[in-house]
Amino acid sequence: MFASFSVAALIAIAIVAAAVVVLASIRATVLSDTIADRTRMGEAVAGGIVLGGATSLSGIVVSVTAASQGDASFAVSNALGGIAAQTLFLALADLFSRGPNLEHAAAEPANLMQTVLLIGFLSVPIAASAGPEVSLFAVHPASVILAVAYVVGIKLTTTMRDAPLWRPVRTAATREDTPSDDHDKDTPLLGTLLAFAGLVALMGLSGWVISRIGAVFIDRYDLSSSLVGALGTAVVTSLPELVTTLTAVRRGALQLAVGGIIGGNTFDTLFLVFSDVAYRDGSIYHAIGPDDLFWLATGLLMTVVLLAGLILRQREGPARIGVESVMMMAIYAAAVGIEVVYSA
């Protein structure tokens, strides 16, 4: 569809699509906060499930579209590069936050649980790619395991939110998840949900446009699918996470900010499931290369550092941010440098 467009036109369309995603995500953040308070599900759970899933839709469309076209590397690197980029966004939010260390202030058992689940989910593709190449209807059993584990994990997370068996120590820097009274209680919840769904659909359509433009650049200039996926479309489609995180921090909804990133990353592992189904040439886990596994390892390492920060709960670090945020930024910068040099 976009193959005959000039470079200037492609860039202009991509910018418009990215702007639509960003603007829609800003409104989605406000609505998800309202949904969290009106349904009493809590900011951490709403951020992880509602907001995290919604802002990930454009990325899903990119990966599924690439997989259906037979480009496994583009599909997988978009998913894994997005996880690394979104974790970086949490560190950036900590940098620009005027309050205490974000991981300290947003202490919440549900966030810890989702981070542990994310580490487990990221381990499954490694085992699948190293194991025998088996599939049923061109779908690897690992995809089924990931899908089932995600559902079970969500159940465990909501259970921890509703009936926690332990709580983090409350300090002066801790920010509790308390429902806000400034939401319009006269607006029906159904109307809020429908508006949220409309924004999600808009972000999904924008994701499709971005995926097609990325594919054009890969074909036209013979670029590495991993490079375009991990540092191109992944970053663009992850912009909602950056915007929603900064917006949530500004609103003081720190649980929503942290939960949105972690939950979004957890949801992003389902990109692999959807991509495996869309990829018709066998198991997608055995079609990926070292570059894609590199971004998987990068996302896994950054997640481990994040979990350590959530547990340590450092009050203040260099430049008034946590040491874990500094480490995550350093890891991502090193990964980008390696990818650029290796792909050159």
Image: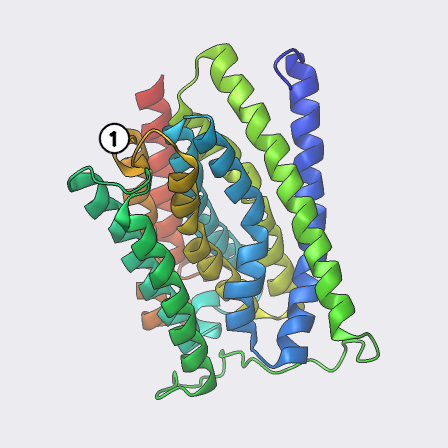
Q: Which residue is mark 1?
A: 290
Q: Relative to 27, does residue 337 appear above or below in the rendering?
A: above
Image check: 317 left or right of 209?
Answer: left
In this image, 226 relative to 172: left or right? left
| Residue drawn at point x = 60 percent, y = 64 percent | 249
- Could you tell me how many numbered marks the image carries? 1
Residue in front for this viewpoint, 171 or 252: 252
The answer to whether residue 329 of the structure is visible from this angle is yes
Q: Note whether 177 is above or below 272 in the view shown.
A: below
Name the residue type under label 1.
Answer: Pro
Q: Nearer the viewer, residue 12 or 150?
A: 150
Residue 141 % position (x, y)? 27, 49
Q: Is residue 81 visible?
A: no
Q: Quadrant of the C terminus?
A: top left
Residue located at (67% from left, 12% from top):
6
Question: In x, y percent, where is residue 234?
Answer: 49, 38
Percent of width and height locating residue 225 = 41, 24
Q: Quadrant of residue 53?
A: bottom right
Under circle 1, the secondary element is: helix
Please, is residue 36 above or below residue 144 in the view?
Answer: below
**Residue 226: percent from the left, percent from the top?**
38, 28
